[in-house]
Image (cartoon, rainbow, N blue to C red):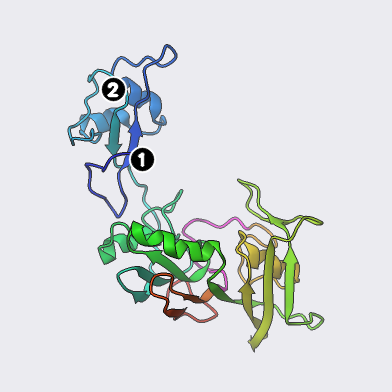
Amino acid sequence: MPPRSPLPARHGLSAAWLRTPDRSPEHAWPTMGDWLRDRLPEFVDVAGMLEDERFVTGDGLAVRAEDPYAPHQFVWFHRDLRDEPEVTAPIHVVHRDERLVVVDKPAFLSSIPRGRHVRQSVVVRLRAELGLPDLSPLHRLDRVTSGLLMLATEPRWRGPYQSLFEHRAVAKTYWALAPLREDLTLPVVVRNHLHKERGSWQAEVVPGAPVNAETLVELESVVDGRGVYRLTPRTGRTHQLRVHLWGLGIPIVDDPLYPEVRDVEVDDFSRPLQLLAGELAFTDPVDGSPRRFRSVRRLPVSAYA
């Protein structure tokens, strides 16, 4: 791990860092500028960032293009962020204390800064809005899924609460809007093996493999000819609920991936996935108190509320 960054967070994001390796015959860089140009992708304007003194060493001094190459040198900088379509729906803070923040996030807002979604992520927005620079999520929630996300206020609380999710000690309840099937007997427990290849859009069922995904599916009510399904996952595989309902012949309304991948523009918020992470319940690992949180949203979810 690097030492403490000399640069403050910007837009809720900590500075990026690089470390120079030992000089070797294969990599002989006369200057720090040569190393940075070789180390960073071509689309990064290294020359401009050097001129603007945006690379700094651990003591906060600017790295200059002509500085002699120095091995084992940490260099910090802030990345340029692209313009992102704004997700205008609010992030509802359901609960906040010294250890935890529980929010009800809207569809299309990423949980963490990643890829094309950096500023428009729960972590980046709330670090700034709540004044919590070390805020970090304790579990995953897909960008297109609405509902509850739990975050730790400081690094010291991550371990105790993250272990709850690792040991499946958090009871999660989701609700989904999906078609009705008169020939489908409910409740039903779906059990199979799910696998998602890196770089693939969809997860797939692997016949005959050991079970690694299990979901209890119940029909709770009927709204405008569609079913409101209560989903209780007993595991947490990627896209588990979406694949399980698709496998039952009742794919979730406005799912952009199942049964077919739809080509959706990054700023198209017109059809949010009708899946809501509705409840979280657990015994607090720090003080032993019972905890239960419920989403303020209801189905059908909107991208603008």
Q: Is residue 123 above or below residue 71?
A: below
Q: Where does the image place residue 78, in percent across and percent down from the top left?
A: 29, 42
Q: Is residue 30 above or below residue 259?
A: above
Residue at (30, 70) in percent of width and height = 98
- Tally the numbered discs: 2
Residue that label 2 marks: 32
Q: Which residues are magenta?
A: 262-275
Earlier along the polypeptide chain: callout 1 or callout 2? 1
Q: Is residue 146 left or right of residue 205?
A: left
Residue type beneath disc 2: Met
On whether residue 263 falls in the magenta region, the answer is: yes
Q: Is residue 94 left or right of residue 265?
A: left
Q: Where does the image place residue 234, in percent across and percent down from the top left?
A: 63, 70
Q: Is residue 232 above or below residue 21?
A: below
Q: Examine the image and state in which quarter residue 4 appears.
A: top left
Element at label 2 = helix
Q: Is residue 26 left or right of residue 199?
A: left
Residue type beneath disc 1: Met
On whether residue 172 falls in the magenta region, the answer is: no
Residue that label 1 marks: 1
Residue at (69, 68) in percent of width and height = 214
Magenta region's main secondary structure? Answer: loop
Q: Where does the image place residue 273, in percent across and percent down from the top left?
A: 56, 69
